[in-house]
Each structure stands twice: as structure tokens, then as C-alpha cells.
Image: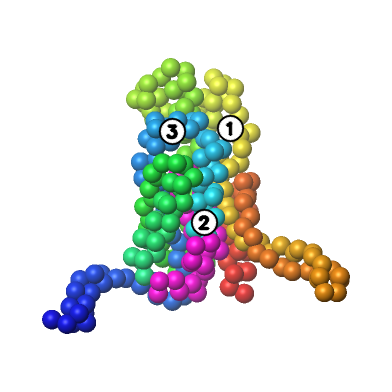
Amino acid sequence: MKFDELDAKMRVFETSHDYFVVPGIYIVVRLDGRSFTRLTKDVHKFEAPFDVRFRDMMLATVEHLMSCGPRVIYGYTQSDEISLLLHREDGSFNRKTRKLNSVLAGEASARFSLLLGDIGCFDSRVCELPTENLVVDYFRWRNEDAHRNALNAHCYWFLRRQGQTDTRATEMLSGLTVAEKNELLFQQGKINFNDLPVWQKRGSGVWWQDVVKVGVDPRTGTAVETTRRRLHRELDLPMRDAYDDVIRKMIVEANA
């Protein structure tokens, strides 16, 4: 059998389940760290519940993903997860979900591992969102999830530092309302949850900004302006409707 015949025969087994995201649909890729609780708490012992070093590694990973090929207009990270919003017209890998997932998970794993000095792996899944409103809802969802997780994490680790076991701390928090968890932190730990850094409670965002730089033309000695794009880290994301407005504005500008 000639190679071309063999290639055509076998290629179908590799591509038979290829799925493409149809044009005009927004793509959000969400990546999650695999076994990151053990990696960050047991192996490398980052500060719990939040560590600036880990936050900055995740942000650097987001920036790498926004610069490695697909046209990403917004990157968001909280805890050990990353969400990437691709431009609606992005055609990377012919919009194959298999390629998007494998490439972005591989890029994230490689970049984070280099930063950590150890193996850190991510999984990936593609979310297909047909409308701008659903994109806004997606990032509102992750933003609200960050808030819930932050409150739970601060309560849990406060109890652990008070000598409670993992099981007992989890039991004590089970069934408590948001108000009761805030009261636990404030009354027993003297921690005002509202005063904690915004990035812990809402996650962090990364987006492109146009920056004007002034230089000198060496031939004429006159000042010249150039516009360059750079990635901006935002550690103080707004809440609720104000956050929705940020996402919506980004989408509108990208599609203009």
C-alpha cells in the first residue's frame, strides 16, 4: 500500500470525531489546574488561602496564552482556573475544539511548569456561547464563583489555624449562610471580608491596551508617536453590573 493510501485510510480514525465551532459563535476556553490543591498546599506549601506568588504565576500563564496564537481579547483567572474569550471571528485551528483544547492546555501546562519549577498540568474545555449576553453572563458567573470560593476558603483556613481538622472545619461550615460566614470571620478572627484584596474575592483580568509611545526620528530629530499594544493586568475588577459593563465594552470594541 502506498503511503498516500495508508495516510488516507488511517487519518479518518484520528479525525472522525473532530468538531468545529461554527462561525459567529463566541468561544470561551476554560482551563483548570489538575490536582492543584495538593501541588500548592502539600508539595510547594503556598500561603493559604491565597498567595501572591501563585496569583502572579497564574497571571503570567494567562498572558502567555493571550500571546501564543489564538486571538484572545480577555483573560480571567481566579484560584487555579483560567477563562479565555476569543475574538468572535478567530479562526485558529479552523475552530476545532480538539485542537483548541489540546494546544491551550499544553501551552498553559508548559508555561506554568516553567514558572513553578515543577510539573503543573491543566485540563481544558470549550464553551460555545451564541450571544454577547451569554458571554457577559459567563464571566459574571466566574466572578461570582470567585467571591463564594474566597469566603469559603478564608473561613476554612481560619478554622484550620484554630486547630480544627479538615473534616471538622468542613462540617462547621456546612449549612452556614453567607452572613454567618462573614460573622464567623469578623467575630472570631477579626477579619472583615469586605476589606480583603479585591483580587482574592473577584479574581483578576487581563486585556489588551493601546499605549502611545513618544520617540525621536533619528533622521530628522523630530518627535514621533507610535501606538503599541500591551497586556494590562487588572487586580481590582468591579462587581456585578459594573463588571458586566467592562465585559460588554470589551466585546463591542473588539467587534467594531
The dot on residue 44 is 3
Q: Is residue 69 magenta?
A: yes
Q: Residue extending furthest front?
A: 219
The residue beneath circle 2 is 64
The x, y position of residue 75, in whole percent, is: 53, 56
Amino acid under disc 1: Phe
Q: Quadrant for the C terminus, please.
A: bottom right
Mark 2 or 1 closer to N-term? 2
Q: Eyeballing the image, is 235 above or below 135?
A: above
Instruction: Please identify, in this view, whether the residue under mark 2 or under mark 1 is nearer the observer.
Output: 2
Q: Residue extending furthest left?
A: 1
Which residue occupies the foreground of this view, 123 or 76? 123
Amino acid under disc 2: His
The x, y position of residue 129, in whole percent, is: 44, 65
Residue stretch rendered in magenta on the structure: 67-94
Are dots 3 and 2 in contact, CB under 8 Å? no
The residue beneath circle 1 is 193
Query: Which of the 4 image quarters holds residue 190?
Result: top right
Instruction: Name the residue rendered at 36%, 70% in the picture.
Output: 96
Packing grade of label 3 (10 A; few <14, some 14-19, many >=20) is few
Q: Is residue 143 visible?
A: no
